[in-house]
């Protein structure tokens, strides 16, 4: 599925007031946010990153991915310059 098809098929991406940041730490480049029932995580750096926080959703169905993003053992493992959309 391409990103435009996902945008057209997911109501959460058409609404304007539903963005909630769930992971952003000072001095870290990666971050994560929710829009309705979607969870998105971004690692713009050139190095691998791990997102681990109680506020993060526990997996779900991966709808879209750039690079490599996996969820296992309550952590999101993100490859360099990666992005993923999860339906939760």
Image (tube, rainbow, N blue to C red):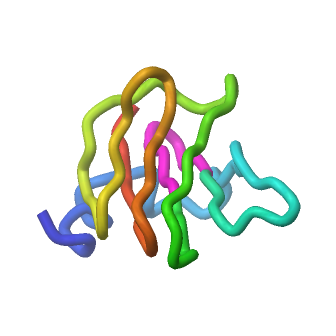
User: Which of the 4 image quarters holds residue 27?
Assistant: bottom right
Q: Residue visible at 44% across and 45% down? A: 77
User: Of helix, strand and loop, which mostly describes the magenta segment?
Assistant: strand
User: Which of the 4 image quarters holds residue 83?
Assistant: bottom left
The part of the chain drawn in magenta is: 33-41
The image quadrant where one finds the C terminus is top left
As rendered, which of 14 and 56 lies closer to the eye?
56
Q: Residue visible at 26% across and 44% down? A: 62
Q: Position of residue 51 (x, y in %)?
A: 59, 43
- In the picture shown, does residue 84 fall above or below 23? below
Q: Position of residue 29 (x, y in %)?
A: 69, 68
Specify whether residue 34 is painted magenta. Answer: yes
As rendered, which of 72 and 14 lies closer to the eye?
72
The image quadrant where one finds the N terminus is bottom left
Drawn side of residue 24 relative to residue 10, left or right: right
Q: Position of residue 68 (x, y in %)?
A: 30, 59
- In the picture shown, does residue 48 fall above or below 88? below
Q: Residue furthest front?
A: 47
Specify whether residue 61 is painted magenta. Answer: no
């Amino acid at each position: 599925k391409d990103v435009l098809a996902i945008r057209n098929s997911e109501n959460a991406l058409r609404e304007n007031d539903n963005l909630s940041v769930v992971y952003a730490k000072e001095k870290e480049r990666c971050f994560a946010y929710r829009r309705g029932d979607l969870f998105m995580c971004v690692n713009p750096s050139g190095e691998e990153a791990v997102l681990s926080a109680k506020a993060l959703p526990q997996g779900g169905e991966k709808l879209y991915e750039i690079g490599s993003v996996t969820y296992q053992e309550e952590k999101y493992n993100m490859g360099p310059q990666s992005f993923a959309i999860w339906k939760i």
